[in-house]
């Protein structure tokens, strides 16, 4: 097998698919656009959901990319040799274009040809969907693999639990898949197959044949177009190709590990405890660097994405402290990651100063109280009868010392205690603070689909954006947007609360445009043309050359992926329900459409 670096693996994958007529598109933001049910982009297909459902993508019907992803569902597992909160997914898509008979031979070629990964055919095992109900066993995929040369004994038919992907949330595009695995060692039993976790097989790639849309009542409707969605984890494939035992042993972490050794005087593999602390500090700092450096860069806060970011940084500080990492150390590690990734993700370089400023501010804030908090924790725990740490104290640690609940929980668990979560929540509610339970729930589920309600609210968001610029100032621009079926939420830069008159003026203006029943017009054009014609768009070059633009008469012009209502008359009555501060210099509006 060929040897690879992270750089050459990304490039090999993307150029392979370019040679098959795919357009290379940049990674989308880590913060999903208009998706209320999930905090972060969790898979390569995630930003492409509208296009899998039939929206036209400006770059065409064959796409390939490497997508940044964050999954923080098992943040407490980080420190072992497999969990990471940040990863990259190599992927290629057919949006209603090619299907199985093209994709399977391409997968085979990429995996086995000496020009690409060069994995020996005998070491390749695949699984295909065994069928269920009206959905047949995927003989077509199996036949295609056989024709390529995969040995029949290495083709496995497996149930939905193993060979079905999606929807990412409760509803949305999904379908049977075929998964490719490297055979690592002899099977543990005659029944052993790629879904066994004995380590005989290691998944390397997944081709999803997305041909169904799961609806709210659990039915699978055929999609209007048949798509292919494939995903190959960069880190895992890099480990396979280089023989690295864990992602931390790849080039991705090489300079950061050296830096951490220099800063702490401790060796990465010195002891189990040190290795674990190293991995936590490295993983969390890398993820924080990417979140702060994202085009929709977020900052540490007490809710939603900002809270997760805060948790990551504070946990890194705590474990860094155990290693003897001096204050300011996280920035030095972040600099290693910026340098390592800046050619692939130029936003890191562009936001470099912001990354360092926010990271060191959060580190300084927490370092100041960490010691006091640990003292308080130790004092309280030595007096706790039984093994339940009081929720009220956990809240005090949060409120006074900035300990996210999860840090207290982790500290307590290290000593064999649990924490009274109910008591903590009650104390939290008593202080009228917003619980972060909302953000925890959001880890679990996935994407929203584009129901009519969210589509209408999306169009209303454009109207609101335009009205704010007219009523308040041309300087106003979108800093964040989030839409549920019930309401829209819109963040924008403005230095003070809006007055009641201004709120009314914005509402009236939006409702006037709704009354005029103006068509919403989509047009594709180059980024330069769009800029010339004064289309707004923070993420102007996200999709490379050609972008989709939406205009609503002369009132609103934005670069946007859609979807939108057909005309403003479909929206109903627009009402602002809340205007509040979101963070320094940023206001937040919540608004609804009434029937
Ligand atoms: N969506 C599939 C996955 O995440 C393939 O990209 O595995």
Image: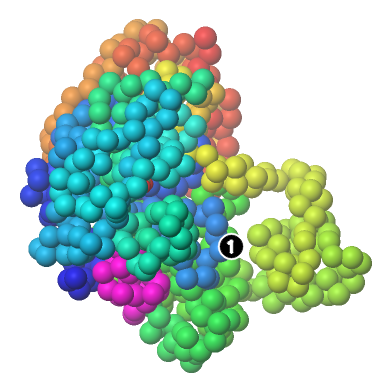
Q: Is residue 109 above or below residue 77?
A: above
Query: Residue at horizontal 25%, vertical 33%?
Result: 227
Q: Position of residue 94 (x, y in %)?
A: 21, 36
- Most distant residue in the front direction: 190
- Residue found 23% across the figure and 62% down from its top: 122
By secondary structure, the bulk of the magenta-drawn segment is best described as helix
Q: Which residues are magenta?
A: 236-255
- Residue 421 belongs to magenta span: no
In the image, residue 244 lies in the stretch drawn in magenta: yes
Residue 173 at what x, y percent from top left?
A: 37, 31
Single out the residue that lies furthest toward the bottom.
265
Please state the horizontal and vertical placement of residue 88, each as a whole percent of the image.
33, 57
Q: Is 87 situated left or right of 527 in this image? A: right
Q: Quadrant of the N terminus?
A: bottom left
Q: In the picture provided, is 151 more to the left or to the right than 272?
A: left
Q: Is residue 103 left or right of residue 537?
A: left
Front in this rendered view, residue 12 or 561: 12
How many marks on residues? 1
In the rendered view, does 564 fall on the left or right side of 367? left
Q: Mark 1 — residue?
A: 76
Give the SS element for disc 1: helix
Counting from the top left corner in percent of width and height, residue 300 is at: 53, 57
Judge whether residue 401 can be spotted in this image: no
Q: Is residue 81 above or below residue 557?
A: below
Kindly identify the residue that appears in the image at 64 percent across and 47 percent down: 436
């Amino acid at each position: 097998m060929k040897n690879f670096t992270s750089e050459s693996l990304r490039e090999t994958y993307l150029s392979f698919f370019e040679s098959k007529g795919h357009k290379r598109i940049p990674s989308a933001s880590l913060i999903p656009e208009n998706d209320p049910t999930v905090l972060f982009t969790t898979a390569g297909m995630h930003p492409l959901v509208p296009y899998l459902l039939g929206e036209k993508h400006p770059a065409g019907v064959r796409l390939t990319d490497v997508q940044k992803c964050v999954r923080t569902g098992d943040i407490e597992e980080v420190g072992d040799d497999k969990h990471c909160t940040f990863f990259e997914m190599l992927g290629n898509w057919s949006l209603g274009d090619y299907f199985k008979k093209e994709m399977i031979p391409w997968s085979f070629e990429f995996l086995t040809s000496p020009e690409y990964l060069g994995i020996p055919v005998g070491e390749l095992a695949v699984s295909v969907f065994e069928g269920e109900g009206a959905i047949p066993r995927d003989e077509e995929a199996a036949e295609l693999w056989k024709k390529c040369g995969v040995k029949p004994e290495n083709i496995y038919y497996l149930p939905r639990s193993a060979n079905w992907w999606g929807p990412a949330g409760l509803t949305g595009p999904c379908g049977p898949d075929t998964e490719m695995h490297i055979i690592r060692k002899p099977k543990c039993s005659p029944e052993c197959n790629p879904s066994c976790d004995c380590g005989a097989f290691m998944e390397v790639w997944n081709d999803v044949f997305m041909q169904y849309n799961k609806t709210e009542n659990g039915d699978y409707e055929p999609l209007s177009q048949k798509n292919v969605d494939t995903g190959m984890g960069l880190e895992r494939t890099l480990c396979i190709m280089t023989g690295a035992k864990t992602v931390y042993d790849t080039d991705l972490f090489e300079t950061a590990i050296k830096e951490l050794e220099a800063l702490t005087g401790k060796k990465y593999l010195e002891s189990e405890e040190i290795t674990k602390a190293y991995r936590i500090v490295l993983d969390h700092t890398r993820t924080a660097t990417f979140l702060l450096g994202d085009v929709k860069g977020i900052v540490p806060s007490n809710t939603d994405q900002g809270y997760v970011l805060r948790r990551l940084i504070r946990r890194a500080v705590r474990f860094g402290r155990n290693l003897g990492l001096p204050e300011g150390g996280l920035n030095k590690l972040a600099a290693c990651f910026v340098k390592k990734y800046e050619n692939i993700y130029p936003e890191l370089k562009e936001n470099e100063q912001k990354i360092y400023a926010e990271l060191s501010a959060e580190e300084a804030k927490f370092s100041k109280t960490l010691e006091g908090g640990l003292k308080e924790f130790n004092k309280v725990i030595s007096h706790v009868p039984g093994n339940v740490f009081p929720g009220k104290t956990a809240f005090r640690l949060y409120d006074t010392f900035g300990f996210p609940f999860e840090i207290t929980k982790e500290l307590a668990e290290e000593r064999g205690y649990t924490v009274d979560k109910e008591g903590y929540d009650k104390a939290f509610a008593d202080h009228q603070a917003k619980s972060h339970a909302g953000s925890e729930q959001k880890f679990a589920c996935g994407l929203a689909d584009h129901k009519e309600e969210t589509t209408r609210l999306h169009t209303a968001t454009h109207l609101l954006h335009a009205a704010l610029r007219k009523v308040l100032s041309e300087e106003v621009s979108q800093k964040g947007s989030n839409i549920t079926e019930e309401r829209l939420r819109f963040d924008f830069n403005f230095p003070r609360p809006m007055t009641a008159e201004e709120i009314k003026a914005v509402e009236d203006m939006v409702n006037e445009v709704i009354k005029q029943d103006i068509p919403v017009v989509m047009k594709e054009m180059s980024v330069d043309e769009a800029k010339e014609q004064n289309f707004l768009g923070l993420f102007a070059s996200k999709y490379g050359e050609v972008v989709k633009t939406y205009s609503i008469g002369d009132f609103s012009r934005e670069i946007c992926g859609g979807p939108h209502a057909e005309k403003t008359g479909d929206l109903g009555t627009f009402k602002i329900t809340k205007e509040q501060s979101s963070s320094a210099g940023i206001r937040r509006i919540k608004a609804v459409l009434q029937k």
